[in-house]
């Protein structure tokens, strides 16, 4: 939403908003650090993500404001995508964003809105960086630098108590004035959950394979039925990595010959469902000649899922495949996790043929039963193949099938 009025009025208005949000701080609940991260440029669009962390320990955020400035000779006309701190995390209102550009200077004001009183946000901010929102700009000139800077005077956060005496202290704020070049790679933000490691209590996926030291440093899809020979690898396993996934761009997923697949990439699935490149940046594909594709997400022991409609790329919006059954060709591709309203890819397809049946038990799970480590038969993905994988995952999904035309 673009506002056109005097910048002095904007700052005065924001100061009033901040006072209503933050009050006059009399006590410190915690210290919050901010940074711009995962900045990238594709075509004529420059995107960057605001991230937050606690300096120490863990804290929760109530009402708050992120106020930043930027160089309009480099980037302009910002749009936003909320990544956290919204209704899914227990906040009473959707985040709001306002911007103003005057001459060579632009200003953005992003508000997190828990509500008018104390609330119960479910998201905890720890010393691990958490995404707040992504901001995408039209590129004006790559010869100029974006000069993205937080304006600390107008930036601050309440604790979940939302009381004047419990606002957090603003710690370090790291801007971004790095020069950039725009690649021809097209970005797509995909979100999926896997049933195996999904926690109904925490509404995200656990990372048992990660903490157990079981995730390989090179992508695991070289063998049948995937036969993907890409060289994706990582030097160390990211803290929030759940597992590797295989993502493909398709012109027509109804084509059973797989001749519709125009790009394939092994990528990293994070605990919050985000799929990212091996360097942690937004998932991207190079060399795509068109703008509209279906995207297939595969996992080594879950039924694959394809976007029900084509996706226009590049896109700043998250393509969220966790909000419904994602029906394609009359197939309900995902299942609800309890009564959460969150949907996940179905566990138990160890042979990757898009049908969960007796072969996934006899030919995959049974030979691996009682083995530890990174195993296809480990359907709950805890690093231990045992009867729970058969009874709680494979058995409840036995007879389920996916979109057979996208079988590898």
Image (spheres, grey):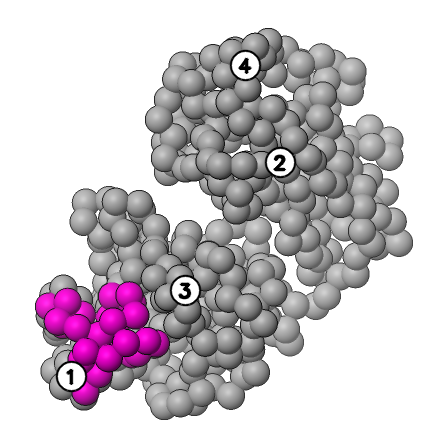
Tell me if I can see residue 386 in this picture: yes
How far, Cα to Cα, is label 1 from label 2? Answer: 49 Å
Going 67% across and 28% down the picture, which residue do you hit?
A: 67
Would you say the residues marked 4 and 2 are in contact, meaning their CB atoms lie under 8 Å apart? no
Q: Residue at x 17, y 73 (%)?
A: 386
Label 1 element class: helix
The segment highlighted magenta reads: 365-391
The secondary structure making up most of the magenta span is: loop
Q: Which mark is residue 366?
A: 1
Locate residue 373, reporting x and y percent: 32, 76
As drawn, is 226 to the left or to the right of 16? Answer: left
**Split into 4 quadrants, where in the image is the C terminus?**
bottom left
Quadrant position of the N terminus in the picture: top right
Instruction: Tell me the quarter of the picture where residue 108 sits.
Output: top right
Using the image, determine if residue 228 lies above or below residue 266. Answer: below
Q: Earlier in the sequence, mark 1 or mark 3?
A: 3
Q: CA distance from mark 1 to mark 3?
A: 24 Å
x, y percent for residue 91: 40, 29
Q: Which mark is residue 33?
A: 2
Label 4 or label 2, whichever lies nearer to me, is 4
- Mark sitting on residue 193: none
Mark found first going from the N terminus, 1 or 2: 2
Q: Which residue is mark 3?
A: 210
Closest to the observer: 33 or 354?
33
Whole-Å distance between the Cαs marked 1 and 4?
58 Å
Q: Position of residue 19 (x, y in %)?
A: 60, 11
């Amino acid at each position: 939403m673009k506002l056109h009025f005097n910048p002095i009025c904007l700052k005065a208005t924001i100061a009033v908003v901040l006072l209503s949000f933050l009050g006059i701080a009399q006590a410190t609940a915690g210290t919050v650090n901010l940074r711009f991260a995962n900045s990238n440029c594709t075509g004529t669009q420059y995107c960057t993500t605001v991230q937050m962390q606690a300096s120490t320990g863990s804290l929760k955020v109530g009402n708050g404001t992120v106020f930043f400035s930027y160089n309009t000779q480099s980037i302009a006309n910002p749009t936003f995508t909320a990544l956290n701190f919204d209704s899914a995390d227990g906040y009473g209102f959707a985040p709001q964003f306002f911007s103003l550009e005057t001459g060579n200077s632009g200003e953005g004001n992003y508000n997190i809105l828990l509500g008018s009183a104390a609330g119960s946000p479910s998201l905890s901010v720890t010393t691990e960086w958490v995404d707040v929102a992504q901001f995408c700009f039209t590129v004006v000139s790559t010869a100029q630098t974006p000069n993205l800077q937080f304006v600390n005077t107008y930036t601050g956060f309440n604790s979940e108590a939302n009381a004047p005496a419990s606002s957090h202290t603003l710690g370090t704020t790291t801007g971004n004035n790095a020069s950039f070049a725009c690649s021809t790679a097209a970005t797509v933000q995909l979100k999926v959950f896997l049933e195996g490691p999904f926690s109904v209590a925490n509404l995200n996926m656990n990372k048992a394979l990660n903490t157990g030291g079981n995730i390989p440093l090179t992508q695991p899809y070289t063998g049948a039925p995937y036969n993907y020979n890409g060289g994706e690898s990582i030097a160390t396993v990211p803290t929030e990595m759940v597992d590797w996934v295989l993502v493909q761009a398709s012109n027509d997923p109804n084509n059973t010959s797989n001749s519709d697949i125009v790009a394939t990439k092994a990528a990293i699935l994070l605990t919050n469902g985000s799929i990212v490149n091996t360097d942690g940046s937004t998932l991207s594909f190079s060399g795509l000649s068109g703008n509209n594709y279906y995207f297939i997400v595969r996992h080594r022991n879950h039924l694959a899922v394809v976007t029900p409609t084509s996706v226009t790329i590049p896109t700043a919006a998250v393509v969220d495949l966790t909000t419904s059954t994602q029906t394609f060709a009359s197939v309900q591709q995902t299942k609800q996790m309890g009564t959460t309203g969150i949907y996940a890819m179905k566990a138990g397809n160890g042979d990757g043929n898009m049908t969960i049946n007796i072969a996934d038990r006899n030919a995959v799970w049974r030979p691996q039963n009682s083995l530890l480590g990174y195993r296809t038969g480990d359907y709950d993905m805890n690093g231990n193949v045992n009867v729970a994988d058969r009874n709680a995952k494979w058995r409840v999904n036995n007879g389920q099938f996916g979109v057979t035309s996208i079988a590898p």
